[in-house]
Each structure stands twice: as structure tokens, then as C-alpha cells.
Amino acid sequence: MHLLFGILVLCILSTCASPSMAQDKGSFDLNEYRWKNRLLVVFAEQEATPAYQTLATEIKSLRAEFEDRNMVLISAFEDGKGTAAERALSSEDVDQLRETFGVNPGSYRAYLIGKDGGIKREGGPEIRLQDVFSLIDTMPMRRSEMRQKASKKDSNG
């Protein structure tokens, strides 16, 4: 089921990459991050939602680890507000994200999207950042990144 949903999201994301779609549905495109960043896409009723605040606090306290994994937080709230990293999203962008992921109003959902654009984990308020880090650290691409970083560190002395 998760594989099918992941394929569906990839198909939708591929469609969103076309310039005409980007103009019609808002200017934000998740494909901007493909092969560069891992995305943590979070849907909440509002920024003050306790589960969202817990996650935001975790990210703030583990900022270096978050950035080391090339992660970007994308937040979408029911009032139409949202952010991608520090960039504000339009209400059309937020609506497009909700539609893409099939998130109903009143739901708290979090999705980890890999650099390849696939959904790696999905969950609700129970998702913790350390668990996300642990999952990422098992991925082949991340292991390669860690080996390259260690190799550079060894060669620099």
C-alpha cells in the first residue's frame, strides 16, 4: 500500500514539474528539492498544534544534524499558511500540497520524502525526529554521503 502511494506521489510530482502546472496551481514545486534534499513535509491544523510544536522544537535543538542530512522542513497549515525552509508558501501552494498528499482537514500528517522523491515514512503525531534520523541513516544514499564525509575528513588530516 505504501509503495503504491509512493508511486502515486511520484507521478503527481512529475506532473507538477511541468511549467504550465506550476503556473496554474501555484509557484511551489517539490521537484526543486529532488536529488538535493530530503523533505519532512508536515500538515497540521495550525502552527500552534502541539505535535507540530514538538517537532519544530526537536528540529531547532538538532539543527546541525537536520542540516547534515540535507533536510528541509515543509509545513502546511489549514489557514493556508505554510513554509518551505524559510520561504513562505501561498495558500494555493498549501492547497496543492494537501491535494497531492491527500491530507484531510483536521489531520496531522508527516511525510519523509527521500532525495529520489519517494515517500520513505509516513505517520502522525508519534513521529519523532530521532526516529527519522535513524531511518535516513540506514539508506544507501545517506551511507554513501557519510563515507564521503569521513573520507574527506581523513584526507584533510
Image (spheres, rainbow, N blue to C red):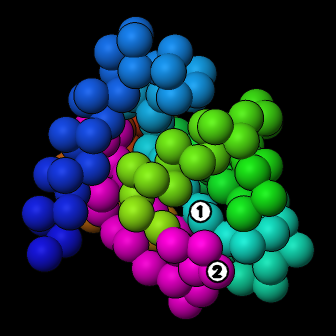
Magenta residues span 104-128
The amino acid at mark 2 is: Gly
Q: In the figure, 23 relative to 52: above or below?
A: above
* Numbered badge on residue 11: none
Quarter assignment of residue 85: top right
Q: In the figure, 23 relative to 145: above or below?
A: above
Horizontal and vertical percent position of residue 153: 48, 32
Q: Tell me, yes or no, whether the highlighted magenta stretch contains residue 89.
A: no
- At x 61%, y 37%, the residue is 93
Q: In the figure, 64 relative to 20: above or below?
A: below
Q: Quadrant of the N terminus?
A: bottom left
The amino acid at mark 1 is: Val
The answer to whether residue 71 is left or right of residue 139 is right
- Secondary structure type for disc 2: loop
Tell me the chief SS of the magenta region.
loop
Residue at the disc numbered 1: 42
- C-alpha span from label 1 to label 2: 13 Å
Marks 1 and 2 close (CB-CB < 8 Å): no
Q: In the figure, 136 relative to 96: above or below?
A: below
Residue at the disc numbered 2: 106
Q: Would you call the spot at circle 2 few (<14 residues within 10 Å), some (14-19), or many (20 or more)?
A: few
- Looking at marks 1 and 2 on the same chain, the residue that comes earlier in the sequence is marked by 1
Horizontal and vertical percent position of residue 46: 80, 69
- At x 80%, y 79%, the residue is 49
The answer to whether residue 108 is left or right of residue 62 is left
Q: Between 76 and 149, which is closer to the camera in this rendering? A: 76
Horizontal and vertical percent position of residue 133: 48, 65
Horizontal and vertical percent position of residue 149: 42, 35
- At x 50%, y 21%, the residue is 24
Q: Would you call the spot at circle 1 few (<14 residues within 10 Å), some (14-19), or many (20 or more)?
A: many
